[in-house]
Image (spheres, rainbow, N blue to C red):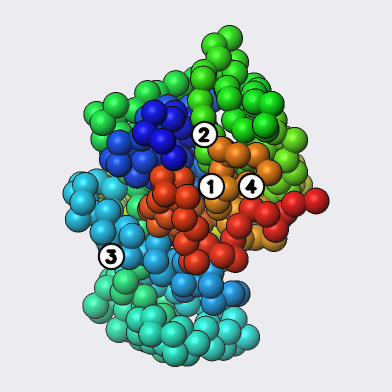
């Protein structure tokens, strides 16, 4: 990449913000484009759990997520942890023998991969970590001390703010309507819904659930899953939990000093059946109350149903699309965990032209016709 070239980052969630921040700090000319506001989409409405323990389907994907966890720790040292970084660990347990056996099998696999995991009893967890839980005393509970949760919107605000201080432009509240190319097929312009047209040399498609639409503007087929999820925030006078946890039927984590975030795959399965979001929120709150009775005193504040950003095979699509010079993708589920490492690796590829082997299994060309 030449220093005079201009990079349009389309989509300013955690992935787009991370790519743009890494480019800006190395002197690149960046313009952030988002149809809404930075960090307000799926980044703000995910469970925001930093982990690799749930990423064991492919060793290369596990390794990428471990690198993502390390990149978060490095980022906290670089920009300061402030309100976005919460490295308090993660708890997980089950309530039926088959699921319990599966969790313990996964823990054994992870330990063999040098991933830190402690097997505790419910009694130990209540005594040492989470006294407000109702987990039965003899139930095995997995504690992953190196995992964390992140306030995604706060992190995006920090990254974009630092990039803007380094000269990055910001175009929010306007969507991309067209991507123009030169005679040789390379990127030339980006047209926006506000009627403006930007001269650019490089496009980074970090548009999350809209990534397939953006890819279509250059006649590329990027297959995406349609997998909606619901997250509810409840307001509490006192937050009674200290870390993210996967309890049976419900996921719970703090969301600041006076809020808790709730999610459940079981409740997500009801989204396509016509359930009202208010009813989804009630079900989430009810499940959470059974695990942490104090949460029964909290008030439902907000619920949002969003489509997750998941390429068709479940793995990230990151890097250059060689048939369209200047076009790159940064599209992935688990963007909260992977944002900092994908941001660093993709920015390095854009700046130097060199591909990192860590992304070898996740290149966009696997979706080529």
Using the rendered image of the protein, determine whether residue 160 is visible from the camera's viewpoint: yes
Mark nearer the viewer, 4 or 3: 4
Of helix, strand and loop, which one carries label 1? strand
Q: Residue under circle 2? A: 202
Spatial distance from mark 4 to mark 1, Cα to Cα?
A: 14 Å
Please give left or right for residue 144 compared with residue 281 in the image. left
Of helix, strand and loop, which one carries label 3? loop
Within-10-Å neighbours for mark 3: few <14, some 14–19, many 20+: some
Which is nearer the eye, 91 or 165?
165
Please give left or right for residue 361 compared with residue 302 in the image. right
Within-10-Å neighbours for mark 4: few <14, some 14–19, many 20+: few
Q: Residue under circle 4? A: 322
From the image, which quarter does the N terminus lie in? Answer: top left
Counting residues from the start of the chain, the first of labels 4 and 2 encountered is 2
Mark nearer the viewer, 4 or 1: 4
Q: Residue under circle 3? A: 88
Which is nearer the eye, 207 or 155?
207
User: Residue 91: x, y in percent?
Assistant: 39, 72
Spatial distance from mark 2 to mark 1, Cα to Cα?
A: 13 Å
| Relative to 268, residue 170 above or below | above
Spatial distance from mark 4 to mark 2, Cα to Cα?
A: 12 Å
Picture disc at residue 330: 1
Counting residues from the start of the chain, the first of labels 2 and 1 encountered is 2
Of helix, strand and loop, which one carries label 2? strand
Disc 4 + disc 2, Cβ < 8 Å:
no
């Amino acid at each position: 990449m030449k220093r005079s070239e201009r990079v349009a980052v389309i989509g300013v969630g955690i992935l787009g913000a991370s790519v743009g921040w890494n480019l800006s700090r190395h002197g690149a000319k960046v313009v952030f484009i988002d149809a809404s506001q930075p960090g307000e989409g799926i980044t703000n409405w995910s469970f925001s759990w930093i982990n690799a323990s749930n990423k064991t389907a492919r060793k290369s994907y596990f390794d990428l997520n471990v690198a993502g966890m390390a990149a978060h720790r490095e980022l906290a040292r670089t920009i300061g942890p402030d309100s976005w970084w919460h490295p308090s660990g993660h708890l997980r347990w089950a309530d039926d023998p088959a699921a319990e056996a599966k969790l313990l099998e996964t823990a054994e696999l992870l330990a063999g991969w040098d991933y830190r995991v402690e097997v505790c009893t419910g009694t130990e967890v209540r005594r040492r970590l989470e006294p407000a839980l109702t987990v039965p005393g003899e139930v095995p509970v997995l504690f992953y001390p190196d995992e964390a949760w992140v306030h995604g919107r706060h992190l995006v605000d920090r990254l974009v703010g630092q990039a803007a201080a380094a000269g990055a432009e910001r175009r929010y509240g306007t969507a991309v309507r067209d991507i123009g190319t030169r005679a040789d097929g390379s990127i030339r312009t980006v047209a926006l819904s506000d009627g403006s047209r930007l001269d650019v040399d490089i496009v980074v498609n970090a548009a999350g659930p809209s990534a397939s639409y953006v890819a279509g503007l250059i006649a590329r087929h990027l297959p995406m899953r349609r997998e909606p999820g619901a997250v509810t925030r409840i307001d509490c006078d006192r937050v009674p939990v200290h870390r993210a946890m996967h309890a049976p039927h419900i996921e719970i984590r703090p969301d600041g000093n006076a809020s808790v975030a709730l999610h459940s795959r079981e409740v997500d399965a009801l989204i396509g059946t016509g359930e009202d979001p208010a009813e989804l929120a009630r079900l989430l709150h009810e499940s959470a109350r059974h695990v942490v009775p104090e949460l029964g005193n909290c008030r439902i504040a907000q619920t949002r149903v969003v489509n997750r950003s998941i390429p068709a095979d479940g793995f990230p699509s990151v890097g250059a699309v060689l048939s369209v010079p200047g076009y790159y993708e940064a599209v992935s589920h688990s963007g909260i965990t992977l944002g900092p490492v994908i941001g660093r690796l993709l920015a390095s590829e854009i700046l130097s032209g060199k591909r990192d082997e860590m992304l070898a299994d996740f290149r966009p060309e696997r979706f080529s016709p």
